[in-house]
Image: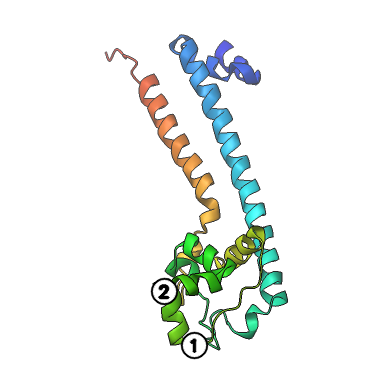
Amino acid sequence: MGNIQSISNPMCVAAFFGSHCTRSMRAWLFFLLVGLLLAGTVGLVWDSALAQTAEEGKALFQEKGCAACHTIGRGPLVGPDLQGVTARRERAWLTRWIKEPDKMLHEGDPIATQLLREYKNVPMPNLRLTDQQVEAIINYLGTFGRPGAAAARALPSLYVPTLLAAFIALIALTALGLRMGRKQVEVR
């Protein structure tokens, strides 16, 4: 009964395991719990920050006139349909393309020149966007998957930190259970 009462003290949670819980195991358990709390907090902060920049990106997409040439999921206009563009193109390329399309065309980037030919030699204008604005637009475009990818959107990447923390906790608790479960019992 003494072991059960010690659980009410948060600093003595590891004491529940009795004499089988060494000092290093208590420290490990403490850091595991702190790590799980931090991972959950980071996941929440990351989720809200990404949602905020995606909203800013949506506003920029309208304000800067992107919708005049591009649709998202309704087919090409003057420029390509942007649904799934974050899956089709590398983020670094997309960032540079949105920031300075004129320089990429001048340098002869193969994808940029192909897009220019494909869309009747109408170049994408340089809108003089800041790095933060470009990031916000890419985050906004990232909220739209590939056509017909509704099933893939069932598990948003925003939950990856939470899933990772849960997986680590599962492994840690399993290891702890296996270590604690090695008691010898006399069977009569």
Report the residue at 59% width, 46% height from top. Answer: 43
> Earlier along the polypeptide chain: callout 1 or callout 2?
2
Q: In which quarter of the image is the N terminus?
A: top right
Q: In which quarter of the image is the C terminus?
A: top left
Task: Tell me if label 1 and label 2 are in contact, CB under 8 Å.
Answer: no
- Would residue 130 be found to the left or right of residue 36 on screen? right
Q: What amino acid is found at the position of numbered circle 2 in the picture? A: Ile
The residue closer to the viewer here, 132 or 170, is 132
- Please tell me whether mark 2 sits on a helix, a strand or a loop: helix
Q: Where is residue 160 in the image (x, y as percent from the top left)?
A: 50, 49
Q: Which residue is most to the front?
A: 106
Compared with 167, 173 (above or below) is: above
Q: Gap between marks 1 and 2, in whole Å?
A: 13 Å
Q: Position of residue 176 (x, y in %)?
A: 41, 25
Q: Where is residue 65 in the image (x, y as percent from the top left)?
A: 68, 80
Place residue 136 in its image quadrant.
bottom right
- Would residue 185 be found to the left or right of residue 66 on screen? left
- Residue 84 can be seen, yes or no: no
Compared with 101, 48 (above or below) is: above
Residue that carries the numbered disc 2 in the rendered image: 111
Q: What amino acid is found at the position of numbered circle 1 in the picture? A: Asn
Q: How crowded is mark 1: few (under 14 residues within 10 Å), some or many (20 or more)?
A: few
Residue that carries the numbered disc 1 in the rendered image: 121
- Residue 183 can be seen, yes or no: yes
Q: Which residue is most to the bottom?
A: 120
- Please tell me whether mark 1 sits on a helix, a strand or a loop: loop
Report the residue at 47% width, 14% height from top. Answer: 24
